[in-house]
Amino acid sequence: MRLHKNELAKCSSEQDIADAKSICEKLKIPHSVADFSSFFDKYVIDNFISSYENGATPNPCIECNYHLKFNKLFDKASELGCDLIATGHYAIIEYSEKYGRKVLKKAKNLSKDQTYVLYRISRDKLEKTIFPLGKIESKDEVRELVKDLNINLAKKKESQDICFVPDGDYAKFIEEYRGKKYPLGNFVLKDGTVLGTHKGIIRYTIGQRKGLGLALPHSMYVCKKDLLKNEVVIGENEDLFSRELWASDVNLTAVDKIDTPMRVFAKVRYNQSEKSATACLENGLLHVVFDEPQRAICKGQSVVLYDGDIVIGGGIISKTELD
């Protein structure tokens, strides 16, 4: 997939495409390139920017997987007469006796597990997807396989950050993409006391401590963003904790519905371990109540539900207890 017009981007570059072509030539299989850059702009970048503009903190990898890799790529595969799609994600698809269907499961190498960003895959797509890396223990094992194939990519670096913001400066990217500066506003305490001036509300995320540019008596954090007043609310660490959230755009794979409270383990960000909770679908929204308060739950991120290593489903967080 060609996803970017920006050659500085960290994936689907011309070099990546050339590398893929060389592998296909060695394996004697056809190589085809699908230009999805316009769809990437629409579904990933535009969503990323509008989420920040609306006070949320998006996860573009989830949007890319959902819209591009497991929708547009499937359409292209169908055009080419392909029966299955294989990707390099660390996850497993297996039949579950408990749920009576194929389910999405955590990778054997839990440190590499990517089920959090894959929960939106529809059930019919799971039937047509293969994750060859799911049961491989380490990246070293993969690199050894590449060496055995005499392919000169064994030392190629992994992509870690958001691919379309190669320097990590999200605010700068948004301003350049939109062609505008975002208005300054006030940093305030919960009681309205003004602490200083912020540089544009898109520059701050819930739980942020560094980079505020404030002279504070002790460590304080971004607890809320008031879009109507263009204010960033600063508070104590304890102000960040809450137990409840509601999520939209719900996708369930292991079950058809959650119409009565279900005991699950849930996580609200990629690099977090799951925590015990109760989940239920209410009027189309996924309502999750954690047993213990969780820190810095952000709108725009996803909540993903697990039963052990099986993904039950998840949704995009649209409201928290602190809103």
Image (spheres, helix red, strand yellow):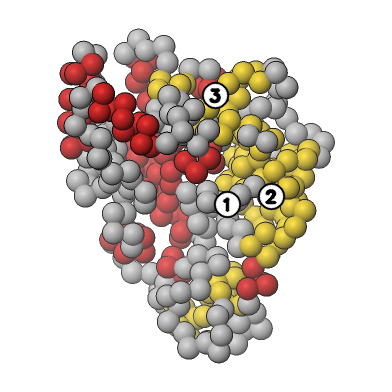
Is residue 86 visible in this depiction of the protein? Answer: yes
Classify 272 as above or below 105: below
Amino acid type of the residue tagged 1 in the rendering: Gln
Q: Is residue 295 left or right of residue 130?
A: right
Image quarter of residue 200: bottom left
Amino acid type of the residue tagged 3 in the rendering: Ile
Between 93 and 319, the residue placed more toward the observer is 93
The image shows residue 128 at horizontal and vertical percentages of: 48, 17
Q: In the structure shown, which secondary structural element does the residue marked by tag 2 occupy? A: strand
The image shows residue 191 at horizontal and vertical percentages of: 66, 83
Q: Which residue is mark 1?
A: 272
Tag shown at residue 93: 3
The reply to whether callout 1 and callout 2 are in contact (CB within 8 Å) is: yes
Q: Which residue is mark 2?
A: 275
Separation (CA) of disc 2 from disc 3: 23 Å
Q: Earlier in the sequence, mark 1 or mark 3?
A: 3
Classify 170 as above or below 198: above
Separation (CA) of disc 1 from disc 2: 9 Å
The residue at the point 32 percent across, 43 percent down is 158
The residue at the point 38 percent across, 37 percent down is 139
The image shows residue 129 at horizontal and vertical percentages of: 47, 21
Amino acid type of the residue tagged 2 in the rendering: Lys
Q: Is residue 91 left or right of residue 273?
A: left
